[in-house]
Image (spheres, helix red, strand yellow):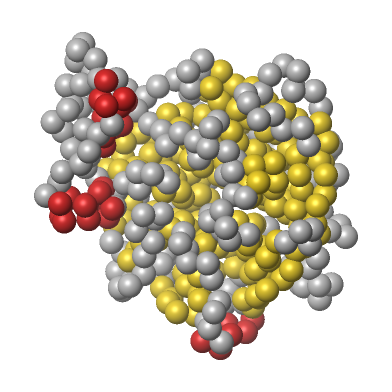
């Protein structure tokens, strides 16, 4: 059956951009934050709301002191971001607060230019050979930590009031690693994370002695450099990776000799992979070919585990079921999700550096390309009902 994708909603700015994050602490609104590089113009942070009922976008622009290479929303406060600055400045990484963030939807009164307040500096030693290029906050509301990634190290910071304290460091040179590209936190374990360097993916347990912290390694996860990875939030032993070979692979960290699944629907480097936080059979990938792919990976998801253990039975909320109309929109009620490409989105004209799911609505996701184009899309109706029904 052909899938009918909905309308794309485009938020465009005349700025170069690399980084996008869903606002993690807000479960009521589809809200995203993006940062600009500030190459030839002042740097900005844009807070963007998407109203799925009205199919409308609204935003607030915050001025920042220097270009932004990466940012991550903090789960413990929806107004706070950990920001990696793009220039060689005194404070390469900092925890900031967006002032005057509305508790409700963004209105025209909120759209006036706002300011950013620096809360804590994450000072990198002057001996650090490389500036940071990525940051990931732990997804738990109660674990106030972030991992700051540079080519030579991953530094773990713990946030208190009002300071930030470095608690652990993973050194590339001491662990025979290539340049570190990315990191991802284990979704439930407070002290476990995975990293990508060269063609290798490694897992770490920071509770252990530094010499034995590495708990798993996939030496040749891809034939090219691994640039993206993410944990399945419902099956935390499953990892997704994206590489320069244009493929996405799923791995079982308990037995990583071979991938659970390989997906080859990109033609260039992959910069971003992201599991849906609720329905983990849905996986986003985006890359240098300008494409955003929505994949169904049901055979390696928690839905498959539930089906095997409970005979495939699932419950559907009455609100979701009532959306199925009598005009044929529920004709796929008997169909089940299958592995494969659901939709390929070609809304971007340049490399797509990030594709992220909304925290508030599991059917909404956003993607960001280098030319400053933010595109918000929704999971096709047909695929949604295959999952729910």
Q: In this picture, is 308 found above or below 127?
A: above
How many numbered marks have been drawn onto this rendered protein structure? Answer: 0
Quadrant of the frame with the N terminus: top left
Left/right of residue 132 with respect to residue 275 in the rendered view: right
Quadrant of the rendered structure where residue 106 is?
top right
Q: Is residue 85 visible?
A: no
Quadrant of the frame with the C terminus: top left
Foreground: 25 or 3? 25
Left/right of residue 74 with respect to residue 367 in the rendered view: right
Foreground: 165 or 128? 165
Left/right of residue 173 with respect to residue 202 in the rendered view: right
Residue extending farthest right: 90
Say which residue appears at 45% left-offset and 62% top-offset. 188
| Residue 45 screen position, x and y as percent | 73, 37
Q: In this picture, is 296 found above or below 345?
A: below
| Residue 236 screen position, x and y as percent | 39, 61
Say which residue appears at 18% left-offset and 38% top-offset. 336
Q: In this picture, is 218 found above or below 138?
A: below
Q: In this picture, is 362 found above or below 5?
A: below
Q: Is residue 147 visible?
A: yes
Foreground: 57 or 271? 57
| Residue 172 screen position, x and y as percent | 62, 77
Say which residue appears at 42% left-offset and 46% top-offset. 277
Quadrant of the rendered structure where residue 134 is?
bottom right
């Amino acid at each position: 059956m052909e899938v009918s994708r909905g309308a794309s909603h485009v938020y465009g700015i005349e700025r170069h951009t690399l980084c996008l994050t869903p606002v993690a602490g807000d479960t009521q609104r589809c809200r995203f934050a993006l940062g600009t590089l500030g190459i030839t113009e002042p740097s900005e942070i844009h807070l963007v709301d998407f109203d799925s009922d009205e199919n409308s976008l609204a935003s607030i622009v915050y001025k920042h002191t220097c270009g932004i290479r990466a940012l991550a929303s903090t789960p413990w406060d929806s107004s706070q971001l950990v920001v990696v600055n793009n220039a060689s400045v005194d404070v390469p990484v900092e925890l900031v607060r967006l002032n005057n963030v509305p508790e409700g939807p963004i209105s025209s009164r909120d759209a006036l230019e706002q300011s950013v307040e620096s809360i804590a500096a994450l000072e990198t030693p002057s001996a650090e050979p490389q500036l940071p290029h990525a940051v990931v906050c732990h997804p738990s509301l109660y674990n106030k930590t972030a991992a700051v990634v540079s080519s030579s190290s991953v530094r773990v910071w713990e946030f208190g009031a009002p300071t930030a304290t470095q608690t652990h460091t993973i050194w590339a040179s001491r662990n025979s690693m290539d340049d570190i590209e990315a990191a991802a936190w284990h979704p439930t374990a407070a002290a476990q994370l995975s990293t990508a360097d060269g063609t290798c993916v490694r897992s770490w347990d920071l509770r252990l002695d530094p010499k034995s912290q590495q708990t798993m390694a996939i030496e040749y996860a891809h034939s090219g450099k691994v640039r993206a990875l993410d944990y399945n939030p419902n099956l935390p032993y499953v990892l997704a990776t994206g590489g320069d070979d244009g493929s996405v692979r799923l791995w079982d960290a308990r037995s990583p000799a071979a991938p659970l699944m390989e997906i080859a629907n990109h033609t260039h480097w992959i910069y971003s992979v992201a599991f849906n936080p609720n329905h983990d059979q849905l996986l986003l990938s985006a890359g240098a070919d300008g494409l955003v792919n929505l994949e169904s990976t049901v055979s390696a998801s928690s839905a498959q585990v539930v089906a095997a253990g409970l005979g495939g039975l699932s419950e559907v909320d009455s609100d979701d079921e009532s959306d199925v109309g009598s005009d044929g929109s529920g004709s796929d009620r008997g169909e089940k999700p299958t592995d494969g490409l659901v939709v390929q989105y070609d809304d971007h004209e340049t490399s797509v550096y990030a594709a992220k799911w909304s925290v508030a609505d599991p059917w909404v996701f956003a993607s960001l390309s280098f030319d400053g184009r933010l595109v918000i899309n929704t999971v096709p109706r047909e695929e949604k009902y295959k999952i729910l029904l």
